[in-house]
Amino acid sequence: MRSFVEMTIKTMTKSILAGVGLAAALPVAAAAQQACGDYTVQAGDSLGSIAAAAYGSFDYQAIFNANRDVLGGNPNNLAPGMVLAMPCADDLNGASLAINVVPENSGSSAAGYNPPIKLLTGSGWAPFSEEKLTGGGFLPRLATTALRRGGNDRDFSLAYVEDLGAHLDVLLPSGAFDISLGWYMPDCNKMNVLSPTSKRQCNEFDASVPVYETVMGYYTKVGSAYEEAVEFRDFTGARFCRVESQLTFDLEEEGLQPPLVTLVRPKTAEDCFEELMRGGVDVVGIEVQSAAAVINELQIEDEVIDNPNLSKVLSMSFLAHKSNPFGRQYILMMNRGLNEMRETGEWFQIISSSLAEYNQQLVTN
């Protein structure tokens, strides 16, 4: 049986290295890669930096898909000298990530008193956001540090509200808070296939530059008919479990909406995996790091499997509601600070130290 620490370190490494791709992308562009040809990986490259230089987008899902065998199914298995096939831009079908990133010419606040920026996050989501970790986890640490970097010197407050749905439905639109931390963004170029909820995230919120990348996994019981799915359409007919506070745009982008799949939306990830073991659902779609903790807690390591053929690399951003008169300015401040932190290495230091602290807690507990 796989140990919890072994399983968690594996999935955490998968996520942190996916995120490192974003850090590498901004300070230096990968060397001279172009679409529609082969590219030889250089030292310091990441899929994120390669995608940004070739297509002008941090979304490297198309490169990952085209090189799944070369990469061994892991988007982090880059090595200098590896040759990647670069899809033609015309073949991407609008796959580049289109999020509402605020341009540099956003407005500024009136002269005089600048109130603290009211930050909002969840809890119980270690190592992303967890009150028991130093600084509240790496998402709060990234956000609060960004407000002191890139020429920023802004006071802030930080609150934890576990009802994530309330963040976007009530707390940001009402002006009770300014920025919510750590949201996956849909591909807003694919509005024709997105659900109304996912479209709303594109239309009503401004997003920061991506702050972290992680991997969405798709879990089945060992021996399930869906275990060997090689394309998302192979999940057609499945009962698919997704926590109710999380969006389903990863499925929508692949054409998997009811009635092609049956969505089951419990409150927690534990509920999803318990339903999987009871036979109430066929597939659980969840971020791989969160899955590791739940699978260990339920002691089902040998009974479930993460589909080796299918995954989604998702980017997290900080969000402000467009009705907030200063929201775009605040997002711009975040972008400036985050960009400087990537250039200096502080972005990576914050994430790696938070993960190390979380790892140590797993070992000692």
Image: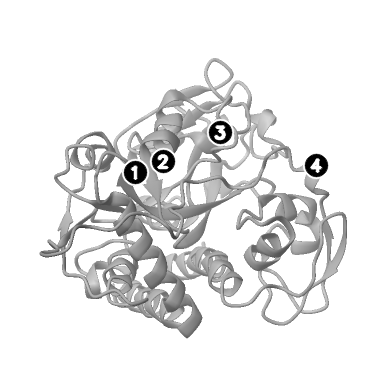
Residue placed under numbered mark 3 in the picture: 251
Q: Position of residue 248 (x, y in %)?
A: 47, 34
Q: Which mark is residue 270?
A: 1
Q: Do the residues labelled 3 and 2 touch (CB within 8 Å)?
A: no
**Residue at disc 2, secondary structure:** helix
Q: Are marks 3 and 1 in contact (CB under 8 Å)?
A: no
Three-letter code, disc 4: Asp
Q: Give the left or right position of residue 270, taking residue 300 as reference.
A: left
**Residue linked to disc 4:** 91
Q: In which quarter of the image is residue 24?
A: bottom right
The residue wearing badge 2 is 273
Measured from the top left, where is residue 77 in percent x and y? 69, 69
Alpha carbons under labels 2 and 4: distance apart: 36 Å
Amino acid type, residue under disc 1 in the picture: Glu
Estimate how packed mark 1 is, as few (under 14), some (14 to 19) or many (20 or more) residues with alpha carbons within 10 Å: some
Spatial separation of the CA atoms under disc 4 and disc 3: 20 Å
Residue closer to the observer: 30 or 216:
30
**Helix, strand or loop under label 3:** helix
State the separation of the CA atoms marked 3 and 2.
Answer: 18 Å
Camera-near label (4 vs 1) is 4
Earlier sequence position, callout 3 versus callout 2: 3
Side of 309 where 137 appears, left or right: left
Looking at the rendered image, the disc whose residue lies closer to the viewer, 3 or 1, is 3
Contact between marks 2 and 1 (CB within 8 A): the answer is yes
Q: Nearer the viewer, mark 3 or mark 2?
A: 3
